[in-house]
Amino acid sequence: MRTIRFPKREQWAEICQRPHIDHSQLQQTVSSVLGDVRQRGDAAVLDYEERFDHVRLSSLAVSQEEMDEAERLVSPELKAAIRLAHQNIYTFHEAQRFSEVCVETQPGVFCWQKSVPIERVGLYIPGGTAPLFSTVLMLATPAKIAGCRDIVLCTPPNREGKVNPAILMAASVAGVSAIYKAGGVQAIGAMAYGTESVPKVYKIFGPGNQYVMAAKQQVSLGDVAIDMPAGPSEVCVLADDSANAAFVAADLLSQAEHGIDSQVLLITTSEQLLNDVQAETDRQLALLPRRDIAAKALENSRYVLVGSPDEMMALSNAYAPEHLIIQTRDYKQLAQQVVNAGSVFLGPFACESAGDYASGTNHTLPTHGYATAYSGVNLDSYCRKVTFQHLTAEGVRRIGPAVELMAEAEQLDAHKNAMTLRLKSLS
């Protein structure tokens, strides 16, 4: 990791840069695969499964027999952990339910909102180097609470044509409606356009590699909504001389092991802590099974020494991290200054892993600086707000003349006439 000491403000933009990914070459590949899936449906998805996931499938749907087999294969201890995490995620998201309020904006003019679930949602769960069954819980649980009628899940199978049993177990616990063996761009296309097996959904959720992200962005241009633009995962740790260097190093490495294009950032006011974290990171890295992946991610990453807590917080807000860990003695005060972050972890014991799995908050979060404008997945992600209004005769008299004047000023005479007729009917 590169070390930067007391950077000037003009250096902050460079510090906040993410690893550069050249998408120009993959966009054409993604577009070609999507077009093929749109044209040929299941046949195209099955062909791409053989080509990319190296498995020949006879059908895409996961059967009840496979669900039952997964139930037997998952250990009792892991089942209990999945159910604990699900309960906490459920509790946190259940508390986000919308309260309907009717407002009388003028006498006789009533306005209100109704929260309506998206009827059919699609969840993408990567298989790859890490089967993310925790993401099943994060995506399906709020969908179920919101009342989504159909919760469709796509995930790549292994070379034996099987889906990781923990993914199937989590899907069962969280209430997924149907599961399909499809990964990568072909899975996004199947959910965006619909095939003979996979239903077309109205919104797609979930992480993935650069091909999956490009596919989500392409289909969002005209075919289906997506949860958010996203890229490689990241963490920013703020620490002072009170921080536990071993904890900080562990937090940095827990993020770095996600993938070679992940990024971690330590911002500290203590040179001694910086040195201690460097030593701890090297020591812990050597013990990791995924150390080659983590080491590559660390090449994209930085230690930054700054002069004050306020500067530390300002640089963090400029970076707008997906995950922000504040391990300082005054973390409660610094938390009040957070403006841009996906999810925040406060104090020495709130490791990112807690939020990734079982504290209850959602781990599907904006990356690549999108925390300046996007929220992480929450209950509202699965809902639409429909507005209603009702006018009495008194309401028409109250706002009618203003509506007429505004419509006339915009030269929309039919708009004006719709109100004029009602006003005349009352005179």
Image (cartoon, rainbow, N blue to C red):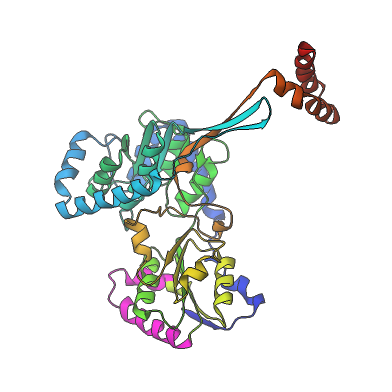
Can the viewer see residue 134? Answer: yes
Image vertical order of residue 90 relative to residue 269, above or below: above
Say which quarter of the image contains residue 323: bottom left
Residue nearest the observer in this picture, 50 or 197: 197
Residue 400 location in percent, x, y? 77, 24
Residue nearest the observer in this picture, 402 or 158: 402
Magenta-drawn stretch, dominant element (helix, strand or loop): helix
Residue at 38%, 49% in the rendered image: 92
Image vertical order of residue 373 relative to residue 282, above or below: above
Can the viewer see residue 237? Answer: no
Q: Is residue 333 left or right of residue 51?
A: right
**Residues in magenta?**
271-297
Magenta includes 281? yes
Residue at 36%, 42% in the rendered image: 140
Residue at 39%, 75% in the rendered image: 248
Residue 287 location in percent, x, y? 27, 76
Image vertical order of residue 49 relative to residue 326, above or below: above
Residue 419 location in percent, x, y? 76, 20
Q: Outermost residue toward the bottom?
A: 272
Which quarter of the image is occupied by the C terminus? Answer: top right
Q: Is residue 391 left or right of residue 101?
A: right
Say which quarter of the image contains residue 245: bottom left
Residue nearest the observer in this picture, 425 or 130: 425
Magenta includes 212? no
Residue 27 location in percent, x, y? 54, 49
